[in-house]
Amino acid sequence: MAEEFRGMPCRRVGNSGLFVSVVGLGMWKWGDPVYDGSRIGDHEGFEVLDRSLELGVFHWDTACSYNLASGNSERLLGRYFASRPRSVREQVVMATKIHNPVRPEHAMDADFTPNQLGASRTYIHFGVDKCLERMQTDYIDLLYLHQSGTDDEGDYRVPIEETWGAFDDLVTQGKVRYLAVSNHSAKQMANVAATLEKVGKDVSRRIVAVQNRYNLVQQDALASEAGGRAADFLKAAARAEVGVIPYYPLASGLLTGRYRKGRLDDASGRIIDDGDQAEFLTEPYLKAVEGLLAVAEAKGISLAQLAIAWLLANEQVPSVIAGVTALRHLEDNVKAAGVQLTDDEMARIDETVDAALAG
């Protein structure tokens, strides 16, 4: 029997007992737009959160340091959970990330000691307690180490046994249910797995997910290392039985069709607001968008739905957490859960992207 919630398909995260909706909700640009660089606040945000549960989207993803290290994405969630019955929190798989520092609320700047960020036992325990406080909850469903914790030479700044011993303690304390990593290479992911085998209380204490950049036009970014290939990383994740949860699945909005070749003068959105034109609005990427729009139109779906469905065609991907800052984005993304791409369509997508990126 297929697992689903309110019509939304669900998948297990890696080799764990945790299920998530295949379409998730990314909350990077959520917070207080007055001062933290976010794009959606409480009024519109609460409406989106309510609607997401109505549509079966119960995998929500944030981080302690989103929006200029303000902590406001988590604070918004806390106000939301406080205003809804406890049953709402129990339905949500709440994922957050720790490693980066967080400013006090409303502070525009802050100085941090080395103990107020990173992967030490001190910061992990302190930081998670602050995450729980901001989100007004007593547990985190899925906790990521947001960065690998290595220096420019690839050496760990903190003994890796200390880091993952602290994560293991959080599971024992009931503050965290499942462990994960973000922005890790295959080698770094293997190091974490081996360390948990040594410091974990039992064999169930393992990383169940990895969250790296991954989308149609930036596929090899998934490897999270120079010269790495997506195909090799996917094989490593499969061997480790770790679920792959992509971030930037729509390439910061490029794969919505909002940015078109020859029409950039009137374009607006996150790429423009964040000053990322040089990264995303390149000739090869814009050429890929035009070709992919033709595939999407032939299928009768939006480009965003095509991009999400392409990721979900890989069973290693339990959920796609596209960023949402308006109700219409959510409504469009949800439809991707029902899109099945044929072998011919997958081949055409690959050919389109390869040809565009080849120049």
Image (cartoon, rainbow, N blue to C red):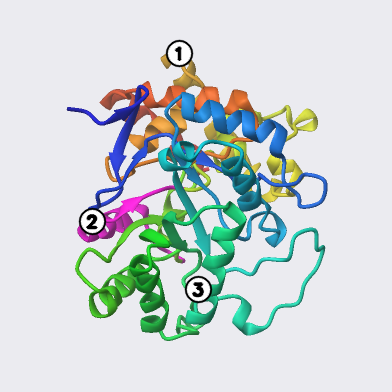
Task: Check disc 3 and report the residue beneath it.
Answer: 124
The residue segment tinted magenta is 226-246
Q: Are marks 3 and 2 in contact (CB under 8 Å)?
A: no
Q: Position of residue 20 (x, y in %)?
A: 36, 40
- Residue name at image x 36 percent, y 53 percent: 230
352 to 102, vertically: above or below: above
34 and 246: which is toward the camera: 34
Q: Amino acid at mark 3?
A: Ile
Task: Check disc 2 and report the residue beneath it.
Answer: 241
| Local secondary structure at mark 1 | loop
Determine the CA span between mark 3 and mark 2. Answer: 25 Å
Q: Position of residue 164 (x, y in %)?
A: 37, 75
Quick check: is 244 in the magenta stretch?
yes
Q: Are marks 1 and 2 in contact (CB under 8 Å)?
A: no
- Residue name at image x 55 percent, y 76 percent: 123
Q: Nearer the viewer, mark 3 or mark 1?
A: 3
Local crowd size for mark 3, using a 10 Å CA cut-off: few (<14), some (14–19), many (≥20): many
- Residue name at image x 32 percent, y 75 percent: 191
Residue 33 visible in this rendered orientation of the protein: yes
Q: Amino acid at mark 2?
A: Glu
Q: Position of residue 71 (x, y in %)?
A: 66, 58
- Identify the mark at residue 300; answer none if there is no mark: 1
